[in-house]
Image (cartoon, rainbow, N blue to C red):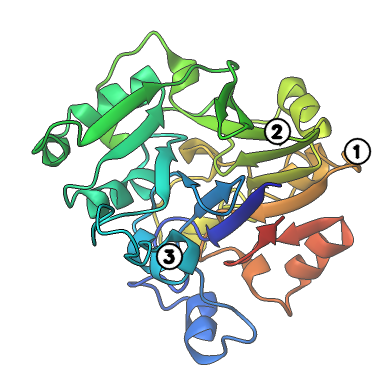
Amino acid sequence: MLDFRLLGTAAGGGVPQWNCACILCSLCRSDTGRVAPRLQAQATFSSDGQRWFLINASPDLRVQIERNTELQPYPVHNPAQGRRNTPICGILLTSADLDQVLGLFLLREFQPITIYATHLVRQVLEANPFMRMFNRIPNQLTWVEIFPSVPFLLDGVSCTPVPLSGSLPYYAREFDSDEPDQATIGLVLEWEGRRIAYTPSVAAIGDELRNIYGSCDVVLVDGTFWSDSELSSTHVGTPLGRSIGHVPMSGADGTIALLANLTSPRKVFVHINNTNPVLDCQSVEYRFVRDHGWEVGWDGWRLS
């Protein structure tokens, strides 16, 4: 049986965001029953409850590990095991976005790790001298290249990278790649005939992605923004949501409308920005989402 968990459900900066006193962040600081605090987006899964794989590595990863005993080091029963150990067997990266990879550098303490990533994402990360911290002992870091639309197995779970239309993050725009379908991917996990899609960053929703969602039992979908111009309401001069790779929830061309005919799978929003009014469980927007068959994911959400 697959155990799939959301360890964090916020977009970059979390909720509340450190430098923000918007209505939602202020409510979160004063009334957590109305706007719950959220760590930055992070997921994990295991097929046996012993060996765990992370989907991405958020900046909040250390806190997320400490909140989930299954991800913590094993007690030392066998002296050969040693006091330094981890049940985390690998990290699957869906992009090179800072919010998805900064947590890697928290795992640099001479602990062997395996990273599953596309060639392009690996190329971007290895261009950063910080990655040299993973080359201090033999076999400290193992890369496994994954390919869009090509499934691979992890402990009996079939993992299929889904190419999405996102671009490389701002800091890596100088990379001129002929592999644009490798910049941002989602993941479809399949086990015992059941399928779950995890797509925390979605720049466009077309027929191919709709068909993938329609084949799943559960879909976890980018819920960064309620509206395209949402950021400018709190910070003048900021970009539109679509321009930074996120389809908004609302509107005739938003996620809720585009997936309105998708009735079979359980639909859950993840990667929610601190400006998104659905964070407020008393808001009109939150009720709209629920009335249209969607859940707003939360830290600790679990499917097993």
Residue 107 is situated, as x and y percent measured from the top left of the image, at: 26, 51
Kindly state the secondary structure of the residue where label 2 is placed. Answer: strand
CB within 8 Å, label 3 to label 1: no
Q: Residue at x 74, y 80 (%)?
A: 282
Instruction: Please tell me whether residue 147 is drawn above or below residue 28 in the rendered image.
Output: above
Whether residue 169 is visible, yes or no, is: no
In the figure, is residue 270 to the left or right of 8?
right
In the figure, is residue 301 to the left or right of 193?
left
Q: Which mark is residue 261?
A: 1
Real-space Cα separation, disc 3 to disc 2, in angstroms: 24 Å
Q: Residues within 10 Å of mark 3 (few under 14, many from 20)?
A: many
Q: Which residue is mark 2?
A: 190
Kindly state the secondary structure of the residue where label 1 is placed. Answer: loop
Residue 64 is situated, as x and y percent measured from the top left of the image, at: 43, 65
Which quadrant, please, contains the C terminus? bottom right
Residue 32 is situated, as x and y percent measured from the top left of the image, at: 57, 86
Q: Which mark is residue 162?
A: none
Q: Nearer the viewer, residue 41 or 17?
A: 41
Q: Which mark is residue 64?
A: 3
CB within 8 Å, label 3 to label 2: no
Q: Residues within 10 Å of mark 2 (few under 14, many from 20)?
A: many
Real-space Cα separation, disc 1 to disc 2, in angstroms: 23 Å
Disc 3 or disc 2, which is closer to the eye?
2
Residue 263 is situated, as x and y percent measured from the top left of the image, at: 91, 43
- The residue type indicated by label 3 comes to Gln
Q: Residues within 10 Å of mark 1 (few under 14, many from 20)?
A: few
